[in-house]
Image (tube, helix red, strand yellow):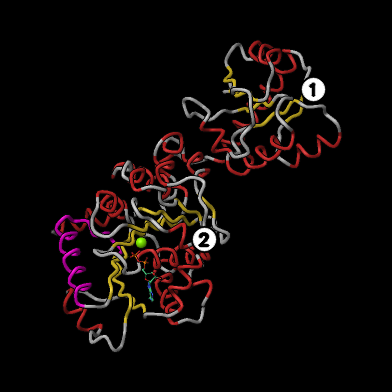
Amino acid sequence: MSRVVLAGAGEDLILRVKQATEGDVHVLPPGRLPGDPARLFEQLVDGELPDVLLVGPHAPAAEVLTLAARLDVQSPGIAVVLMADPSPEMWQAAMRAGIRDLLAPDADVAEIQAAVERAGQAAAGRRRVLRPVTETERYAGRVITIASPKGGVGKTTVSTNLAIGLTAHAPQSTVLVDLDVQFGDVASALGLLPEYTLPDAVHGPASEDTMVLKTFLTQHPSGLYAVCGSESPAAGDTVTGEDVSRLLASLAREFRYVVVDTAPGLSEQTLAALDRASDVVMLTSMDVPGVRGLRKEMDVLRELCMIPAGRHVVMNFADPKGGLSVRDVETAIGTGVDVVLPRSKAVPGSTNQGVPIISSHRRDPMAKELHRLVARFAATPLMKAGKYRARHRAAG
Ligand SMILES: Nc1ncnc2c1ncn2[C@@H]1O[C@H](COP(=O)(O)OP(=O)(O)O)[C@@H](O)[C@H]1O
Ligand SMILES: [Mg+2]
């Protein structure tokens, strides 16, 4: 039996649908139909997605068409049946919005039953095509965590630019997660106005179904998806390490690249992100306190066996007159430096305007070096963190 959700129905229609489905229907309270699938899913008590969304004649046609068109893209496993006068114009608009069937508002129980059954079968068929593989067989995307012991060294700058750069290689398959849970500013750096933020993505219906989770993401015009930081530090604090771990695992099944911006230091959330990471970008400013901090952080992570397979050391704010050479830094941290990002006058402006420098100032020396960082991920194949760690532990 299909799971049916009914919206926009009066008393009389509710009765007919209950008969047609033998009472197995979830009736949404009267009122506006949400134009956004995520809002619709919020109204479902158990968070389980329906097979069929049946919409009665009380819902305004324009709202139904908007919702149906979005569902068709975001949750194609749900079939929408609309009860409206089946005029040729209505049929055409319905077809364009991906509505499965039109039914006259006065359809009887048998007609409703037949339409719901057909729609349920169609939905099941589409889901089979869409989800041909089991959980374990699904794609394991690369999780790249940007970390640094200190604030203000360019984590958000690097993560937003890296994410935009990777989106060019994997459009619609790159997501950026703002794990600076208290003071995240990814949304501002990308000029985004998120409707949902990190706490929404880890609590409630989004945490139980990856298809639902996708509707809680914010889209950037470039094709990048983002989980933006919470609006208040208190809300951010409700996000645990376990939440982070679950979120990143789900995203890695759906996206080729998951880029994670973090808060300074090794918070519970950052440690969870490092544990899930295939790669870490260890970032620091190119000065003595910055390099010392990086050295300490690397020591701690090494002791915890938490340095992922892909480790990329990046210096920011490089200044030829700063008195520190790359060689000095490499000696101090005991390992090679992979990318050196120069200080650039264009960066603060791009941060303030919400347009990453990699897309606004392609010729800027900082943008060029950022491309070098992007290429490290776009050009090398994925290596599973788990496998590496097993070897790493065996060797140690
Ligand atoms: N290479 C750079 N040149 C000039 N300014 C930079 C550079 N990298 C970052 N900034 C600026 O430094 C400030 C802090 O950077 P941000 O990315 O927010 O750091 P974090 O996320 O580590 O706290 C921002 O105003 C940013 O514009
Ligand atoms: Mg930041």
- Relative to 309, say whether 23 is above or below: above
Residue visible at 22% across and 53% down in the picture = 390
Viewer-side label of 2, 1:
2
- For ligand 1, which image quadrant applies? bottom left
Give the image location of residue 34, x and y in percent. 61, 35
Of all residues shown, which one is farthest toward the right? 88
Q: Quadrant of residue 94?
A: top right
How far across and how far down the image is residue 48, in percent? 49, 28
- Secondary-structure class at tag 1: loop
Badge 2: few (under 14), some or many (20 or more) residues near its Cα, within 10 Å? some
Report which quarter residue 303 is drawn in. bottom left
Q: Which of 167 and 61 lies nearest the eye of the viewer? A: 61
Prevalent SS, magenta region = helix
For marks 2 and 1 on the same chain, the one whose residue lies earlier in the sequence: 1
State the residue position of label 1: 104
Asked if the stretch drawn in magenta spans residue 395, the answer is: no
Report the span colored magenta. 288-310
Contact between marks 2 and 1 (CB within 8 A): the answer is no
Q: Which residue is mark 2?
A: 191
Left or right placement of residue 1 versus residue 287 in this view:
right
Residue under the point 44% across and 56% down:
176
Residue 7 is situated, as x and y percent measured from the top left of the image, at: 64, 25
In the image shown, does 190 or 327 lie closer to the viewer?
Answer: 190
Label 2 sits on a secondary structure element that is loop
- In which quadrant is the N terminus drawn? top right
Residue located 58% across and 18% down the image: 25
Q: Amino acid at mark 2?
A: Gly
